[in-house]
Image (cartoon, helix red, strand yellow):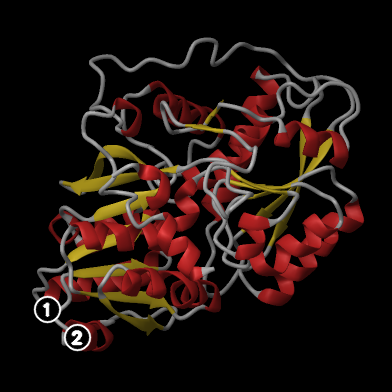
Amino acid sequence: MAATAAAVVATSLAACSSDDDSNTVDGASPSAELPPGAFAGKVASGEPVRIGLLTNEGGQAISQPETREAAEAATKYANENLGGIAGRPIELVVCKTQEEPTAARDCAQQMVEQNVPAVVVTSTGLGSIVNPIITGAGIPYATALGGSPAEIMSENSFVWTAGSNTSQAMAAYGKEQGWKTAVAYSIDSPAATGSLERMGGPAFRANGMEFELITIPFGTPDATPQVSAGLDKDPQGVLVYGESTVCTSVIKALSTLGSTAQIIAPQTCAAPDVVSAVGPTAVEDMKIFSSGDSVSDKPESVLYREIMAKYAPDTSTEGYAVTGYQSMLGFVRAVQGLTGDVTKETVGNALRGAKDIPLPAAEGVTFTCDGTAIPGMSSICGNKMIVLTMKDGVLTDPQAVSVVPPQTSGQ
């Protein structure tokens, strides 16, 4: 699995030509505009359709309520403007996985017992636990991100973006930059470390780099000892994985120790509370690997911020909320052609027939769920992700990057 994933992204960044407009999100437009008909006022009516929603919150180590809040905002928007699903309003059946195996398993079983016609997952590192239970019951499983083999290769699983391959794409970036050594600082959670050990580490090594994983216990206020140990390897690049506490403690330590290594991280480390705690200088030029563009003046990005401002005004749009928004609104868009009964069978058929669906918060990026987006990963519907750069404490310059298999890249 790891070798396949590594091969898929071996040319993910290097294979992108600057002349290919389909792979690059341009700079901000002079005037921000919404997509045509974005707030059409097509209100859903009738008996609600109950859709499962699994969220990665409530746990001691990892809790990201913003992903649920964004998914709920997308749902309210869809009910008031897109006619919900098949003209009926969406009613969410929410379960918080706590990012803990027992709770996650219980959530998946609840979805089966409730007989929901689909489950949307905002984000989880426990896909290997929840996905088989849900898809095994014939219930479609939909998410913007999914890293476990179960999520990316199950018959009833649908993953909108190639952001599922974050650590592998980071490895491709490191190769492009000529790194010899990379060190990952990760929250000491099986969900995070398991992914890095199973997929990230092999991808870095396959791209010719030494790779070391150093764990940071949840709640560590000062990660200087662990960070110092990693810097002894003289890495050219460092990965920072975790929620805001770990991001803050690691980035602070890197700054204090005078590290010149390039920092790369998922969007959790771009949250405003992290930037405020470490200071803009500490995150200058940090590369953020994301599934979405939350900052540009492109119509899809503007729509994201407008929806959040209207339906979840107290939730920051700059952190990980965008994944919950993408998961939910991507699902709604993918089943917009559905009419009649809303069952797990009709929803599954609608998702399998989804073609060229605009990915929320990612202008110009689409997904098609015919199993061909990334060879060997039949459940992934899209082959792009977005890389942003921190400048003066804010995310800038979103670049949509194709994940192209070496055998088909032609380069």
SS at badge 2: helix
- The one nearer the camera, 311 or 235, is 235
Query: Residue 330: in sight, yes or no?
Result: yes
Which residue occupies 17% across, 82% down?
A: 231
Which numbered disc flags the more N-terminal residue, 1 or 2?
2
Of the residues shown, which amino acid type is indicated by label 1? Answer: Leu
Q: What residue is disc 1 on?
A: 257
Q: Which quarter of the rendering shows the N terminus?
A: bottom right
Query: Residue 405: in sight, yes or no?
Result: no
Q: Quadrant of residue 21?
A: top left
Q: Is residue 14 left or right of residue 401?
A: left
Which residue occupies 35% across, 24% down?
A: 298
Q: Is residue 387 left or right of residue 377?
A: left
| Residue 146 spot, x, y in % from top left | 57, 56
- The one nearer the camera, 259 or 271, is 259
Of the residues shown, which amino acid type is indicated by label 2? Answer: Ser
Q: Is residue 195 above or below residue 173?
A: below
Q: Quadrant of residue 110?
A: bottom right
Which residue occupies 54% across, 39% down?
A: 326
Q: CA distance from mark 1 to mark 2?
A: 7 Å
Which residue occupies 56% across, 15% down?
A: 39
Q: What residue is disc 2 on?
A: 228
Q: How many numbered badges does the structure rendering display? A: 2
Q: Are marks 1 and 2 in contact (CB under 8 Å)?
A: yes
Q: Is residue 339 above or below residue 254?
A: above
| Residue 160 spot, x, y in % from top left | 56, 42
SS at badge 1: loop
Q: Mark 2: few, some, or many residues within 10 Å (few <14, many ≥20)?
A: some
